[in-house]
Amino acid sequence: MKPLCLFLVVATAAHAVSPTNRLENLTLEQAIALAEGQHPGLAEARALIDAADGRARQAGAFPNPEAIVGAQQIPFSGNAPNEKEYVAGVGQTIPLGGRLGKARQAELLDREVRARGLEVKRRDIRKRVHSAFATALYQEKACQAQTEIQRNAEKAVVTTQARVEAGDALREDAARVEMELARAKIELKRAESLREQALVTLASAMGDATLSVKSLVGTLDATFEIPTLETLAANVSAQPESALADADIRARNARVDAAKAERIPDVKVELLYHRLESSQQNTFDVGLSIPLPLFNRNQGKLREARAEVAAAEARSRMTQNELTTRLRESHLQLTAALANSRTLKAEILSRAETVLKGAEARYAAGDISLADVLPVRRDWAAVQLSYLESLRDVMQAWAELRHWSR
């Protein structure tokens, strides 16, 4: 999404939020935009990037000079000869072997790893919001379907009671339709409860559980063009997870270079003014100290860094394997879900409606009994809900697969 478009979506979403954190007529785009703007997981990832920036800056900083002040041969008694000496000067540690540059490069690559991780987290949050939105929208549509089922049950009660009063039906039939109405009311309350739970889950996926989502705007019945598996597989290397794995390998290799550079000892140079009190002479001293790498040659750290490279390469191979597996599974899920929803819509929905209308008309005319029409009503209700479930499955599968085609 372009920055201007994202700003407009966020502004529209913010306008939909009242001071009491109520969200009315929330769209999928607004939900995703709000998540990207407020999710604490993204805020944490951005803060970690800032921390990596600070480490990179610090790693390239030259060591501070040292002020040196001292006195030598100070006697314990006043009768001793005056041989005191005073020293003042500066000392400077000079890193060799390009250690500072390599340390800074390692931290900069670590920052890139953090940035790639932010993209992975952002996409994961978008998928979760998309999936939660699909579930909440399904529950909202299911509530509407259950409301329609309850209305039909209420009409059946009125029709049956009229037939009982006319002597065309038994009181047992009226009791049966009243039982069906009671079941429909229970199912509606259950659907309403599941809808509220789904909206709470959606608010949590957006990163703020205090949000009160009241209504959604969207359709489950959308048109999808499934890219071929080969086309999607060609984009595996362009996925944020792949970029993260590659950046991790480069960062680990940079740590190896930094560990190698640290094997070269730093040189310390001292420039000192030396005052000899006994002869009232001023002298100038120069000192140079170099650690001798006899006991610590940084071999342990170098070994650790090389092992981390091997581990990063293994993680990269695992990432490629997981991405390929997820891609194939998501493609299969979306293909199957689309086939199911299209079959339900094209071959079952309209026929279930026709069968129900015919059965209701025949029952109203007294041609069939209540025992004949009740299974037809239940089948019609089951088909409506099955179709909604298939559309939810399509949206959830598309939430996983849509990012592969970008």
Image (cartoon, grey):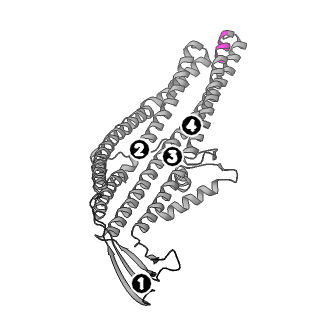
Mark 4 — residue? 141
User: Between residues 273 and 46, which one lies in front from this camera angle?
Assistant: 273
Which callout, 2 or 4, points to the residue nearer the camera?
Answer: 2
What secondary structure characterizes most of the magenta part? helix
The segment highlighted magenta reads 172-177
Labels 2 and 3: the sequence-earlier one: 3
- Tag shown at residue 274: 1
Kind of residue sitting beneath label 1: His
Q: Is label 3 in a helix, a strand or a loop?
A: helix
Which callout, 3 or 1, points to the residue nearer the camera?
Answer: 1
Mark 3 — residue? 129
Q: In this picture, is 104 found above or below 385?
A: below
Label 2 close to label 4 by CB (< 8 Å): no
Q: Looking at the image, which residue is at 70% across and 17% down? A: 161
Give residue 272's position: percent from left, percent from top: 40, 82
- Tag shown at residue 400: 2
Kind of residue sitting beneath label 2: Glu
Q: Quadrant of residue 262?
A: bottom left
Disc 3 crowd rating (10 Å Cα; few below 14, some 14-19, many 20+) is: many
Label 2 close to label 1 by CB (< 8 Å): no
| Left or right: 338 in relation to 301 | right
Q: Looking at the image, which residue is at 67% across and 13% down? A: 175
Q: Is label 1 in a helix, a strand or a loop?
A: strand
